[in-house]
Image (cartoon, rainbow, N blue to C red):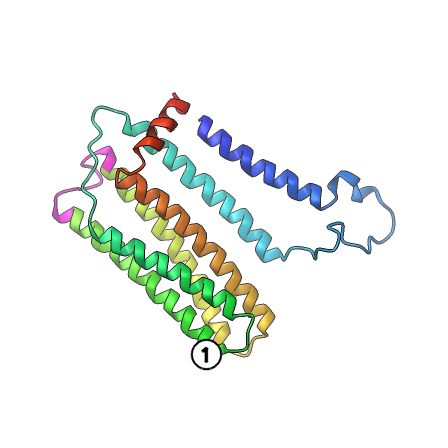
Amino acid sequence: MSLMGIYIFFIVSIAVWWLWRQGVMRSPWLEEGEIAAYPGGSLSPPPAAKLGLGVFLAVAGCLFSLMAAAYFMRAGSPDWRAPPTPGILWLNTMALIASSVTIQLAAFEATRSDRSRLEFLLVASGVLSLAFLLGQIQAWRELVDAGVFASSNPASAFFYLLTGAHGLHLIGGLAALSLTIRRAWTEQSNAALAASVELCAVYWHFLLFVWLLLFAMLAGKADALGVICRRILS
C-alpha cells in the first residue's frame, strides 16, 4: 500500500505544518496566565467549520485513495473486463464542472451586496448538481439495460462502487447547499453567509477533482497512471 502511504505522509505533513504554525513547538500549554496573542502572527484563528471541513476532506480523500488503489490492483487480473463507458458521463462531467464554476462565482458574489444574484448562482449550482446525479442514475440504467450488473465482473462492481460513493458525497453536499440557500433567503449577515458559501465551494471543487480522476479511470484514460500504481503496489 505504498500509494496510500504516500497520501498519508502528505496529510501528516500538512498537519505538522499547521501545528507548527499554531505554535505547538513553543509548548503553549506550559505557559502561565492568559495567552492574549494568537500564535499565528497577524493571521486570525481558522474558523472551526473550515477546520472541520478540512479534516472531513482528508478522510474522504483517504477513502477514495483506498478505492483507487484497490481498483488498480484488481485491474491487473486476467478476468478484468471493463464495462462500456456510457456516453452520458461526458454530459454529467460538464454539468459538474458548470456547478463548480457557478458556486465559485457565488463565493465571489457573497462578499458583495447583490443578494439576488447570489441566490441565483446558488440555485443554479444545486440544479446542475442534481442534473449530474440524475445523469449518473441514467448511466446506471443504461448499463443495466445492457446486461452489466455489479455481479457481472469485478470491473463492473468497481464502476457502481466508485460512482455510488461519489454520488453519496455529492448528496451530502447538496444538503449543506440547501441550508446555505435557505440562509441566503433569510436575514443572515453577509459574513456568515459568505463563510457558508465558501465552504460549499471548497467541497464542490474537491468533488469535481475526485470525479475527474474517477472518470479518467473508468473511461480507461488513466492506464499510464494505473501502470505506475501497480508497479508501486507490487
Could you tell whether 119 is left or right of 211 in the image? right
Quadrant of the image occupied by residue 217: top left
Q: Is 133 placed above or below 221 here?
A: below
For label 1, the SS is helix
Q: Which residue is mark 1?
A: 116
- Residue found at x 30% / y 32%: 223
Q: Position of residue 215 (x, y in %)?
A: 31, 45
- Residue stretch rendered in magenta on the structure: 144-155
Q: Main secondary structure of the magenta part?
A: loop
Quadrant of the image occupied by residue 91: bottom left
As for residue 185 lying within the magenta part, the answer is no
As for residue 154 lying within the magenta part, the answer is yes
Q: Position of residue 220 (x, y in %)?
A: 26, 37
- Residue found at x 24% / y 54%: 137
Amino acid under label 1?
Answer: Ser
- Residue found at x 16% / y 42%: 148
